[in-house]
Image (cartoon, rainbow, N blue to C red):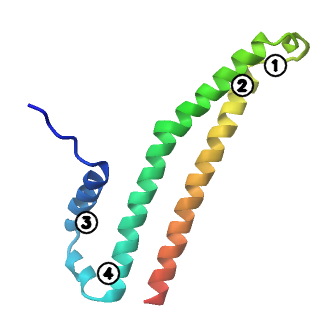
Amino acid sequence: MDKKTKNKFDLLVEILSGKFSQIKNIELLNKSVETKRMWSYLVQTIVYLHSIKSLFIGIYVPQTNKFVHDWKEEFNKSKYSRFLDVDEELWKHETNQLIRIGYVTLFHKYETFVGNFFQLLDEN
């Protein structure tokens, strides 16, 4: 029997819905336009941050490792590599620096989310 794979977005929203439904009086979020707006922003941003996290873990980190590995191999094949003192620590450092760039981007997305959410709370 061929099982249809569930849409990842649907799964995430269903998980969030299940978690939020456990909060006492959660239905009060649908009482006003302002709380609906906050609720919508909250869910959309959680889904967005989750997708960025998945992208970071599933694509960015592995591709960064592959990029540095390929660059290292190319360097080692260079006729000039013997003139440069490059050790394994440098390659680790470069890998960590590239991953850090992605991490900082993810953190800034989170910071923006928090700032915007507090702004929504202050408006109401």
Dot 4 falls on a residue whose secondary structure is helix
| Residue position for label 4 | 36
Residue annotated with mark 2: 91
Secondary structure type for disc 3: helix
- The residue depicted at 48 percent of the width and 39 percent of the height is 57
Cα separation between marks 2 and 1: 8 Å
Which quadrant would the N terminus be assigned to in this image? top left
Q: Residues within 10 Å of mark 4 (few under 14, many from 20)?
A: some
Q: How busy is the neighbourhood of tag 2: few (under 14 within 10 Å), some, or many (20 plus)? A: some
- Secondary structure at numbered mark 1: loop
Q: In the rendered view, tell whether residue 60 sits above or below residue 124.
A: above
Q: Which residue is mark 3?
A: 20
Look at mark 1 in the image and give the residue it sits on.
Answer: 86
- State which tag comes first along the sequence, 2 or 1: 1
Separation of marks 3 and 4 at Cα, in angstroms: 14 Å
**Dot 1, crowdedness within 10 Å: few (<14), some or many (≥20)?**
few
Q: Earlier in the sequence, mark 3 or mark 4?
A: 3
For the point 32% across and 88% down, the residue is 33
Residue 5 figure quarter: top left
Distance between mark 4 and mark 2 Cα atoms = 49 Å
Residue 31: image quadrant is bottom left
